[in-house]
Image: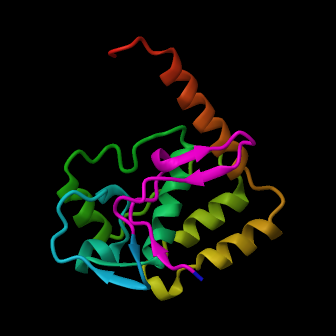
């Protein structure tokens, strides 16, 4: 099994193929392996990072699960920036680490999706679901709206970009 830590899992890196299957893109920050420590965290997507990454620079598949929860927030809030009311990235870091700030499920998110999103934000990585568990949860959940919403969100974003004047 190929073990890749994506490190930039976000709605902006989701694409659709001709059959509307979601594909993850932008593996520029990704790493191969189970665990990685980043000594210098220069240009990283702070609003999508798990607490352990913010605190220690450690990345694992569980940090990608956290980012998946943020991706769910993005999709169900129609592309809203995570923690949009907090302008300074230093404050996002402080509030997530010290004050336990977590994204709240958007209003029109199904209760099943809200449970899954909230589970992605377990503070301790060992208590967070794995992607295998996430996949199983989605298979057993019949009322999830993530995939249709993600497809709709990407299509809407692409139609807006396609209609924008050149050079804008």
Q: Quadrant of the C terminus?
A: top left
Residue 7 part of the magenta segment = yes
Q: Position of residue 50 (x, y in %)?
A: 38, 70
The picture places residue 118, in percent across and down from the top left corner, at 56, 66
Number of disc labels: 0
Q: Is residue 109 left or right of residue 7?
A: right
Q: Which one is nearer the viewer's eye here, 76 or 152?
A: 152
Name the residue located 25 percent from the left edge and 64 percent from the top edge: 93
Residue 103 in percent (x, y) is at: 45, 57
Principal secondary structure, stretch drawn in magenta: loop
Specify the quadrant of the image occupied by residue 41. bottom left
Q: Which residues are magenta?
A: 2-30
Q: Is residue 96 above or below residue 36?
A: above
Q: From this viewpoint, which residue is outermost toward the bottom?
A: 126
Give whichever of 22, 51 is nearer the camera.
22
* Residue 32 relative to residue 85: left or right: right
Q: Quadrant of residue 142?
A: bottom right
Which residue is rendered at x = 37% and y = 64% of the image? 101
Give the image's coloring scheme: rainbow
Which one is nearer the viewer's eye here, 164 or 104? 164
- Picture residue at 23% right of the left edge, 76% below the top: 38
User: What x and y, as percent, mark residue 138?
Assistant: 74, 66
Q: From the image, which quarter does the N terminus lie in? A: bottom right
152 sits left or right of 41 in the view: right
Residue drawn at x 54%, y 37% is: 78
Q: Horizontal placement of 15 versus 32: left or right?
A: right
Q: Is residue 12 magenta?
A: yes
């Amino acid at each position: 099994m190929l073990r890749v830590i994506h490190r930039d899992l976000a709605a902006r890196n989701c694409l659709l193929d001709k059959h509307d299957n979601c594909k993850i893109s932008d593996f520029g920050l990704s790493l191969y392996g189970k665990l990685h420590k980043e000594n210098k965290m220069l240009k990283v997507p702070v609003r999508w990072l798990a607490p352990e990454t913010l605190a220690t620079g450690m990345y694992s598949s569980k940090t990608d699960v956290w980012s998946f929860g943020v991706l769910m927030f993005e999709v169900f809030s129609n592309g809203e920036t995570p923690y949009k009311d907090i302008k300074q990235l230093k404050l996002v870091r402080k509030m997530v680490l010290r004050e336990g700030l977590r994204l709240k499920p958007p209003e029109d998110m199904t209760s099943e999706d809200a449970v899954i999103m909230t589970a992605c934000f377990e503070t301790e990585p060992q208590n967070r679901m794995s992607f295998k568990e996430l996949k199983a949860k989605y298979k057993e959940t019949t009322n999830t709206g993530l995939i249709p919403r993600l497809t709709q969100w990407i299509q809407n974003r692409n139609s807006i970009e396609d209609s924008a004047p050149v050079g804008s």
